[in-house]
Image (cartoon, rainbow, N blue to C red):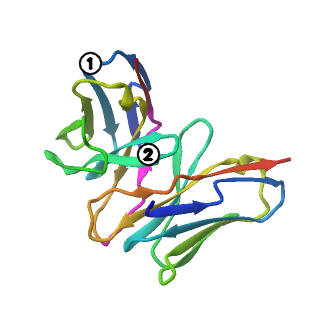
């Protein structure tokens, strides 16, 4: 079983919709990361969080440590938000480096 | 954007040949990582470095070696490439380790095909 699970795997929505991507993990962590990968392949770090909630523009990330769950929300979605969104965790006490989910492929249609 | 350069960006080679990928950073970050990305698996850690000449294995290190002789350069070597090592390889850097978590910044990737 994967230590980091994302849902849904694929999501198609209309422009303007509120988007939620979920991430569940089964290990102790020191931090959780949300990353964005555009079709060109580059990976950009969106958020790193260990508790609570962070907001950047139209993006909001939340984490519930007790439930081992995080969500990434996109408000007023736009076609330029189309990308693969990847959840990753930094495991507590383990080797360095991140453990990744398989990603959520998001398409926002005009 | 973090100053990370991967080279080459694309490479096609034959089974059994040695291959070296280079990651160069201008951020003076202590920590550097090599990941591979494959369909159905996502990104997986190959090796990482926590300082000059200090490296350790990740989840999928078999068949790979690394070296870090300078802060700015982290090399990934496939001593005898196999078709299973066809993948997209990403380098990443980070300013810190331990409880002082910092984001990882990624290079643009190297697409490697082993025929």
Q: Nearer the viewer, residue B82 or A38?
A: B82
| Residue drawn at x 48%, y 84% as measured from the top left | A66
Tell me: A3 left or right of A71.
Answer: left
Point out the stretch of residues depicted in magenta.
Answer: B99-110
Mark closer to the observer (2, 1): 1
Tell me: A48 left or right of A53.
Answer: left
Image coordinates for residue A14, horizontal then vertical, percent: 84, 54
* Residue A62, picture quadrant: bottom right
| Residue drawn at x 32%, y 71% as measured from the top left | A92
- The label on residue A81 is none
Q: Chain of mark 2?
A: B
- How dense is the environment of label 1, judged by Cα within 10 Å: few (below 14), some, or many (20 and up)? some
* Residue B115, picture quadrant: top left
Image coordinates for residue B84, horizontal then vertical, percent: 37, 31
Where B21 sits versus A31, above or below?
Answer: above
Main SS, magenta residues: loop
- Label 1, secondary structure: give it: loop
Q: Chain of mark 1?
A: B
- The label on residue B106 is 2
The residue identified by callout 1 is B16
Mark 2 touching mark 1, by CB under 8 A? no
Tell me: B86 left or right of A18.
Answer: left
């Amino acid at each position: 079983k994967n230590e980091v699970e994302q849902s849904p795997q694929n999501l198609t929505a209309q422009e303007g919709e509120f988007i939620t991507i979920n991430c569940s993990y089964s290990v102790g962590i020191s931090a959780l990361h949300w990353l964005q990968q555009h079709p060109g392949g580059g990976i950009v770090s969106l958020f790193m969080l260990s508790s609570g909630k962070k907001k950047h523009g139209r993006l909001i990330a939340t984490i519930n440590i007790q439930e081992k769950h995080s969500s990434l929300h996109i408000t007023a979605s736009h076609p330029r938000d189309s990308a693969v969104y990847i959840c990753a965790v930094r495991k507590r006490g383990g080797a360095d480096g991140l453990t990744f989910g398989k990603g959520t492929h998001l398409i926002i249609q005009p | 954007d973090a100053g990370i350069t991967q080279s080459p960006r694309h490479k096609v080679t034959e089974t059994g040949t040695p291959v070296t990928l280079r990651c160069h950073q201008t951020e003076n970050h202590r920590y550097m990582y090599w990941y591979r990305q494959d369909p159905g698996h996502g990104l997986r850690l190959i090796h990482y470095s926590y300082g000059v000449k200090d490296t350790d294995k990740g989840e999928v290190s078999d068949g790979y070696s690394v070296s870090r002789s300078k802060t700015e350069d982290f090399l990934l070597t496939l001593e005898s490439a196999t078709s299973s090592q066809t993948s997209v390889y990403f380098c990443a850097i980070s300013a810190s380790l331990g409880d002082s978590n910092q984001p990882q910044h990624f290079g643009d990737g190297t697409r490697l095909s082993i025929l």
